[in-house]
Amino acid sequence: MAHPIVRYWLVILGMGLVTYALRLSAIPLYGRGDVPPAVRRALRFVPPAVLTALAAPAMLRPAGGVDLSLTNLHLVAGSVAALVAWKTRSALLTIAAGMAMLWALAAAAR
Amino acid sequence: MRDPSPRAEFAAGAKAEVPVLFGVVPFGLIYGALALQAGIPPGAALAMSSVVLAGSAQFVGTQLFAAGAPGALIILTTFIVNLRHMLYSASVAPYLSRLGLRWKMLLAYLLTDEAYAMTITHYQQTGTPTPALPARGGAREDQRHWFFLGAGATLWTTWQVSTAIGLYVGARIPASWNLEFALPLTFVALVVPAVTDRATAAAAVAAGIVAVLAHGLALRLGLILAAVTGIGVGILTEWRTR
């Protein structure tokens, strides 16, 4: 059994290696030989799918359970932010509008 | 007109990442504070932020350390929690194919959720992958990997500093400020321009529904399930409308 400190470092190194392997995976392979058209088509959908999957739970399940009501402040603020994103295409304005909306609604609800 | 020089690309990448930092800082602070509570030595907790560089995996890892889980289980769990990075890797690969191995290895290290989101948006909004661009060494050579580096380095630095503050000072941002909501808002800001037609809209909606319904699954499996479903629905929609 290794010394506890050594164990922490070994496990962290292992965590880093598997994470790095996943991040590197496709990058050196691309361009060696032909990429099947099906793969190219699929890659187009990675950004919309992943970005929505990252954002949606924080809007629709802010407190754990699914909440589609207007009392879900995160959903209202997120919808306003989506509208701002659509109109302005600015990340900064989108975040500012969403946060301001959330703070205003939370203050009003208190 | 966009300035495509390396310096301008780097600065643009760093600047693009700034709004995200409002959401990243609270996570870093909380991670640092939790790692300390879990009994992880501060040096090791800090090292985890630079060696692993993945917020959700670090949170789960910290919990497992605290529970006395075996190292192999912690590493396997990290692998599963970070599976989505394979999708990011495949998604940016066409844009990096022209670069040397050292650039590829460096940028892969910086391929976090936030850096991926900003970088892929920049790549898609500023043109096609490599084949259509001028030959290597040309005056208009593609320098957008500097944007990736600028975004990645900004996020890296913020993550290290905020976890260090969380470890040595503690997390003192009131929860009522809801600052971590800035993170999903950033993804909202980026997904809107990524939806350009019916198929990408279908991919986004399907991924969103699955992500919400499967959010309770352990190890962030809901996220990868949602992403794969979204990609599948996107392909099917495109195929049917052709």
Image (cartoon, rainbow, N blue to C red):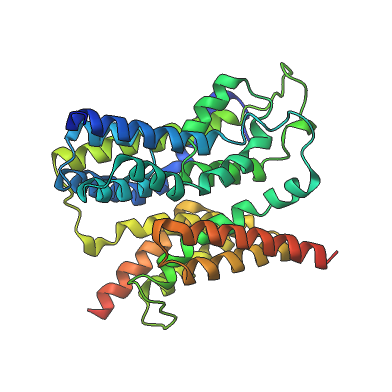
- The picture places residue A46, in percent across and down from the top left corner, at 62, 52
Residue at 55% in and 28% down: B146
* Residue at the outermost right position: B242
- Picture mark count: 0
Choose top left, top right, bottom left or bottom right for residue B139.
top right
> Which one is nearer the viewer's eye here, B83 or A48?
B83
- The picture places residue B141, in percent across and down from the top left corner, at 70, 23
Residue at 44% in and 80% down: A68
Above/below status of A81 relative to B102: below
* Residue at the outermost top position: B137
* Residue at the outermost front position: A1
- The picture places residue A64, in percent across and down from the top left corner, at 34, 72
Is B178 placed left or right of B209 in the picture? left
> Which one is nearer the viewer's eye here, A95 or A21?
A21
Is A9 placed left or right of B56 in the picture? left
Above/below status of B179 relative to B89: below
For the question of whether residue B1 can be seen, the reply is no
- Of the 4 image quadrants, the one containing the C terminus of chain A is bottom left
- Of the 4 image quadrants, the one containing the N terminus of chain A is top left
- The picture places residue B76, in percent across and down from the top left corner, at 41, 44
Residue at 66% in and 55% down: A45
Residue at 43% in and 69% down: A59
Is B51 placed left or right of A3 in the picture? right
For the question of whether residue B199 can be seen, the reply is yes
